[in-house]
Amino acid sequence: MKHVIAVLSLVTLTGCSTLIDGITGKYHNYDAVEYNLAVDLVVRSRGIEPRCSDAVVAKKEVQELGQRVDYFLAYTEGRPYNKRTNELAKKIKDMVTDTEKRDAMSSFFCRERAKNIVKAAEILRGSSGEKRE
């Protein structure tokens, strides 16, 4: 009888351990702070296009987005499971930097660039959120 109880206890403990590993392992690489920053980038990037009729205001929005991307990059650097999102943020930063360097920006260019930045930010957010699956 003692052997039966010992075997059942071992099986129960092993099952609980596997269950806990399955739950915690599923979210092991998920970073809530990173995801929050990614959502912030999406929201801020969506604010550029409505302001494209005024190039000065749009450029200011792009500069503010650039600061948020810098913050995101500083957070994700050196964190091994954030490497992919860090690379995506660098691509957004390249678009932002290119936009900031322009002396003149047409409304059409502004709208198209804003759409590209929004799309990239949404991909970044999706990549960050996929770590939960």
Image (cartoon, rainbow, N blue to C red):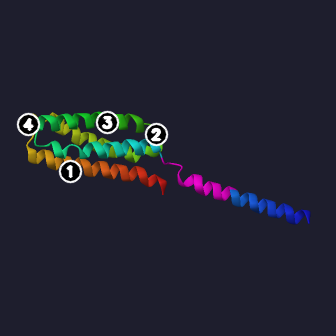
Which amino acid type corresponds to the residue marked 2 in the rendered image?
Arg
Which residue is at a point 26% across and 44% down the rendered structure image?
A: 45
Image vertical order of residue 7 relative to residue 122, above or below:
below
| Residue 43, percent from left and from top | 30, 45
The one of 108 and 7 positioned closer to us in this rendering:
108
Image vertical order of residue 69 relative to residue 23, above or below:
above
Label 4 and label 3: CA atoms lie apart by 23 Å
Task: Give the numbered dot on residue 115.
Answer: 1
Q: Which of marks 4 and 1 is nearer the N terminus?
A: 4
Please tell me whether mark 2 sits on a helix, a strand or a loop: loop
Q: Name the residue under label 3.
A: 68
Which amino acid type corresponds to the residue marked 3 in the rendered image?
Arg
Q: In this view, does 107 lie to the left or right of 34?
A: left
Question: Does residue 28 belong to the magenta stretch?
Answer: yes
Q: Specify the segment rendered in magenta.
A: 17-30
Disc 1 residue crowd, few under 14, some 14–19, many 20+, Cα 10 Å: some
Q: Mark 2 points at which residue?
A: 79
Please tell me whether mark 1 sits on a helix, a strand or a loop: helix
Q: Quadrant of residue 48?
A: top left
Question: Does residue 128 belong to the magenta stretch?
Answer: no
Q: Earlier in the sequence, mark 2 or mark 3?
A: 3
Q: In this view, does 119 lie to the left or right of 52?
A: right
Which residue is at a point 39% across and 47% down the rendered structure image?
A: 84
Label 3 and label 1: CA atoms lie apart by 18 Å
